[in-house]
Image (cartoon, rainbow, N blue to C red):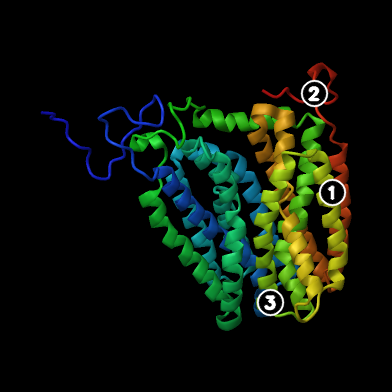
């Protein structure tokens, strides 16, 4: 008679290394791999974090009315937030290696909750810079691209691309959830109610992260989803952080890096920096209700998901340089028409703009990643992290600049026209980026050979 004891209740059983089927007589692995629970927790975290990015656009007018702060002063806090978000992102993976995904996510959510909650007590502009600029900026930067990439890389081998795409789209879904709700709260109960709700939502997620999020499959006696053997060891936290700096030093000496970083900076400037931050107050200048403008901006998030998936499909089939050129030219043309579309009510022409702009919002990401991979090989994820940093810096500059334009000229029209012109520059950068020579000796910019 066998004396083998069954596994303890709730304990995951490690699958056989030889394949997906367990050995004869071995207990069966759980039907639902724990990787999907981890992905679900991360999805919840990212959807919640989107609420922090949504709130400043809704607070612009209420803070201006209550405290008399200019649009430029309020925009400076959003600008600082974006800069710190971008600068934190390249090093977030090293933080997660050293301290763990669970701790970094919990601390980041707590920082963002503290920053949002403390705004209810602020009376001076520097307090908004500290709360929304520093605390929320560092917290959100710690859970940007690196959070998605680290979770997908550790827990998934099969379906990694699908999981990455779904988690990336979580921000758009978060805007869809939070924008209309926060606009309704501000309209009915004041801007402090929105800050309180965002802070409470973040704190409610922290216990879920601490209870359910796990660092690696090996902690539960599992292999990554779809894996048949242990993944190779990676660099230690110090190596990851130093490698990010080494890759920046090497890639920044090449022309493709600056063309990609420059075009992606304009991408950030014309999306998060301008439309994401100033669309709602600009619509308010023309008499549109804040709830209606927030609903339109949330609709961008719906078509953002569709456009990103379709762009990925096109990137596999067409030249990424030409795709980027077309995306930026179409975006620039739409921005030139936007000032004429604002009105007191939502009309069909504005809906057409929202649908079109939503489809184009982050359609630039798949071809930009593909070009990073083409030119920089195994360093492409790190290079893209720095290119994304440029995206956030561009967003920060235009978020501040558009607020100053509104203060000086009394309208946002010049900001929309200027952004349209910048898109022509971004299209030119994309088209100037040639295909990589097959022979590295024939290169013209010294870019490292891909692995």
- Camera-side residue: 426 or 124? 426
- Camera-side residue: 28 or 160? 28
- Camera-side residue: 331 or 7? 7
Q: State which tag comes first along the sequence, 3 or 1.
A: 3
Tell me: 328 left or right of 131. right
- Tell me whether circle 3 and circle 1 mark residues in contact (CB < 8 Å): no
The residue to which callout 1 is attached is 326
Point 38% across, 50% down: residue? 212
Other residues around mark 1 within 10 Å, as few (<14) / some (14–19) / many (≥20) = some
Other residues around mark 3 within 10 Å, as few (<14) / some (14–19) / many (≥20) = some
Query: Residue 52: x, y in percent?
Result: 58, 62
Point 74% across, 68% down: residue? 279
Query: Residue 235: x, y in percent?
Result: 52, 27
Query: Residue 419: x, y in percent?
Result: 84, 58
Asked if residue 397 can be seen in this view, the reply is no
CA gap between label 1 and label 2 equals: 27 Å
Q: State which tag comes first along the sequence, 3 or 2.
A: 3
CA gap between label 3 and label 2 equals: 50 Å
The residue to which callout 3 is attached is 292
Numbered badge on residue 446: 2
CA gap between label 3 and label 1 equals: 30 Å
Tell me: 25 left or right of 168. left
């Amino acid at each position: 008679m066998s004396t083998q004891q069954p596994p303890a209740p709730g304990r995951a059983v490690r699958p056989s290394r030889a394949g997906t089927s367990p050995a004869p007589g071995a207990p069966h692995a759980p039907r639902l791999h724990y990787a999907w629970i981890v992905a679900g927790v991360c999805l919840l975290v990212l959807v919640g974090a989107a609420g922090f990015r949504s709130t400043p656009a809704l607070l612009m007018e209420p803070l201006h009315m209550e405290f008399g702060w200019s649009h430029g002063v309020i925009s400076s806090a959003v600008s600082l937030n974006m800069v710190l978000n971008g600068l934190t992102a390249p090093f977030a993976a090293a933080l997660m290696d050293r301290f763990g995904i669970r701790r970094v996510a919990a601390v980041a959510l707590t920082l963002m909750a503290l920053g949002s909650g403390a705004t209810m007590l602020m009376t001076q502009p520097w307090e908004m810079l500290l709360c929304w600029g520093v605390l929320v900026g560092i917290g959100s930067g710690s859970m940007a691209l690196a959070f998605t990439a680290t979770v997908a890389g550790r827990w998934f081998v099969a379906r990694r691309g699908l999981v990455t795409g779904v988690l990336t789209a979580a921000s758009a879904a978060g805007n869809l959830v939070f924008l209309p709700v926060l606009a309704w709260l501000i309209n009915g109960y004041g801007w402090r109610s929105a800050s309180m709700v965002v802070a409470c939502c973040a704190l409610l997620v922290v216990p879920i992260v601490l209870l359910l999020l796990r660092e690696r499959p090996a902690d539960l006696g599992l292999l990554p989803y779809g894996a048949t053997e242990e993944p190779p060891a990676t660099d230690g936290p110090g190596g990851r952080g130093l490698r990010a700096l080494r890759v920046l030093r090497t890639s920044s000496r090449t022309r493709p890096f600056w063309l990609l970083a420059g075009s992606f900076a304009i991408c950030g400037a014309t999306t998060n920096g301008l439309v994401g931050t100033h669309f709602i107050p600009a619509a308010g200048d023309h008499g549109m209700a804040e709830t209606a403008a927030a609903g339109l901006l949330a609709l961008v998030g719906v078509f953002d998901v569709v456009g990103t998936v379709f762009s990925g499909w096109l990137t596999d089939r067409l030249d990424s340089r030409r795709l980027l050129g077309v995306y930026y030219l179409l975006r620039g043309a739409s921005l030139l028409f936007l000032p004429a579309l604002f009105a007191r009510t939502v009309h069909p022409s504005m809906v057409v703009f929202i649908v079109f702009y939503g489809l184009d919002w982050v359609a630039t990401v798949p071809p930009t990643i593909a070009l990073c991979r083409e030119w920089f090989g195994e360093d492409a994820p790190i290079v893209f992290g720095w290119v994304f940093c440029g995206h956030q810096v561009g967003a920060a500059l235009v978020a501040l600049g558009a607020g100053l334009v509104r203060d000086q000229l009394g309208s946002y029209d010049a900001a929309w026209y200027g952004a349209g012109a910048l898109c022509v520059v971004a299209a030119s950068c994309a088209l100037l980026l040639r295909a990589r020579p097959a022979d590295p000796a024939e290169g013209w910019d010294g870019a490292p050979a891909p692995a």
